[in-house]
Amino acid sequence: MVNKRRSVVDSIPSSKCYNDYDYEPYSSQEDLSCCQRHRCYFITVTFILLLLVLIFIIVFVVLPVTFMLSADVQRSLIFLTSQSNEEYDFTNFKKYGIEGVRNLYVTLNHNISVGIWHVLPLEYTYPAVEDDDFDYAEILRESRYPVLLYFRDSGENRITSKNKYLVFRRFFHVFTFDYRCFGDSSQGLLTEDGIVNDAVQLYKWLRLQTPRPIYFWGHTLGAALASKTARQLRKELIVPTGLFLESPFTNLEDAVLNFPFVWVFSWLPWFKGTVTNPLKQNGFWFQTDEYMLSVDCPIMMIHAKDDSYVPFTFSTKLLEISNEMRIDRDQGNATLYLFSKYLRYGHNDLYQASELPDYIRKHISICNYYELGRG
C-alpha cells in the first residue's frame, strides 16, 4: 500500500519541475529582447558611422574640391564684396560724421567707373563747409599738401575707414576709392590684376590734377594691392613718393594658412592641390613680400601685436625681407612700428594710436629727403 502511494506521489510532477517548465518561456523572451537590443545598437552605430563618413566626405572632400573648381567661390571669400555693398548714401557726409568731403566718380579704362571720396586737409574743412561753391579741384591743384591714395582691406567701402581719414587729413588730401564691384563702383571681373590696373589709371588721373607728391596707404589686402600698383608703375618709370603698409601679410598663401578654422583642413594631403594652388592658378597671388622688392620709395609699416586676424609676425618678416633684399640707397629704407598688445588696437583701430601722427610726419620727412637725394 505504501509502495502504491509512493508511486502515485512519484507520478505527480514535482514542484521544481513545474517551476522550471513554467519559467522556460520567459527565458526565451529575454533572449529575444536581448537580441533585439543588440540589433538596435548595431543599426544605431552603423548609422552614426555612415553619418560621420558622409560628413567627412562633405567637409574634407566636397568643400575643398568645390573651392578648387570655382573661381567665384575663391573670389567671394577673398574680397567679401557682400559686406561692402549694403545700402549706403555716399553723398550724405554728415550722416557718417565727416565733413569737407566731395563724392566723385572717375571713369577708367575698360569702362570701369570707381566711386571716390576726396577728403580735404583739415585746414580747408571749415571753408568748404561754409562755402557751397568751394572749388575742391582748385584747392587740390594749388595747395601745399601732398596726396594720399588709400587702398582698403577686403569687405570694406570708402565709408568704412572714415575715422582714419580724420588722422590722414592732418597731412594729406585723402583720395579713397572703392574697388570695382565694391560700393557704387562699376561691376567688372574682380581680380587682383584688374584692381591694380584700375589703381594705375587712377594714379595717372591724380597726377593730372596736382603737381604735389602722391603717397600710397594700404591696409592688409590693400597693402598687397598698393605694393603691386607701385611695382606696376615702376615699369613705366613712375614712382610714388612713399608707401605706408598697415597690418600687411606676406602673401595670400601664408594668410590663408592663418585664417580661422583653416587648420581643420591644412593636414589634408590634398589641401595644397585644392586650396592654395588653385588661388595662384586663378591669379590671386597678393604677394606683398615679392612686390615690395620692386618698390623704389621708403616704406613704413605699422602693426598691432594683438592683431588676431593678421599676426604682427608677418610685418617683422616683411622687414627682414626688405633689409636683406632691398637697397636703401636706391630704393629707400623700410621702417616698422609695433604697438603693444595691451593697447588693444587689434586689426582695425591703429588710427587711435597717439604716436601715429608723429610716425606719419617722420615718414614724410624721410620720403622728402629721399626724393631730394634721388632728384
Image: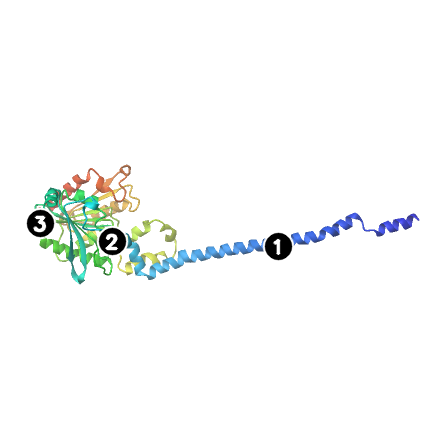
Find disc 1 in the rendering and name its residue: 35
Q: Are marks 1 and 3 in contact (CB under 8 Å)?
A: no
Indicate the position of residue 293 as horizontal and vertical percent values.
20, 52
Q: Label 3's element?
A: loop
**Which residue is situated farthest in the right direction here?**
1
Q: Label 2's element?
A: loop
Amino acid type shown at disc 2: Gln
The Cα atoms of the two marked residues, 1 and 3, are separated by: 90 Å
Q: Say which mark, if any, is on residue 102.
A: none
Which residue is at 56% across, 53% downward?
41
Count of all numbered marks drawn on residues in the image? 3
Indicate the position of residue 11 as horizontal and vertical percent values.
84, 52
The first of marks 1 and 3 along the sequence is: 1
The Cα atoms of the two marked residues, 1 and 2, are separated by: 63 Å
Q: Is residue 270 above or below residue 375?
A: below
Q: Say which mark, if any, is on residue 287.
A: 2
Relative to residue 208, is residue 349 drawn left or right?
A: right
Q: Nearer the viewer, mark 2 or mark 3?
A: 3
Q: Are marks 1 and 2 in contact (CB under 8 Å)?
A: no
Amino acid type shown at disc 1: Cys
Which residue is at 74% across, 51% downward?
22
Q: Label 1's element?
A: helix
Find disc 3 in the rendering and name its residue: 135
Amino acid type shown at disc 3: Asp
The Cα atoms of the two marked residues, 2 and 3, are separated by: 39 Å
Q: Nearer the viewer, residue 125 or 324?
A: 125
Relative to residue 136, is residue 19 drawn left or right?
A: right
Indicate the position of residue 6 as horizontal and vertical percent values.
88, 49
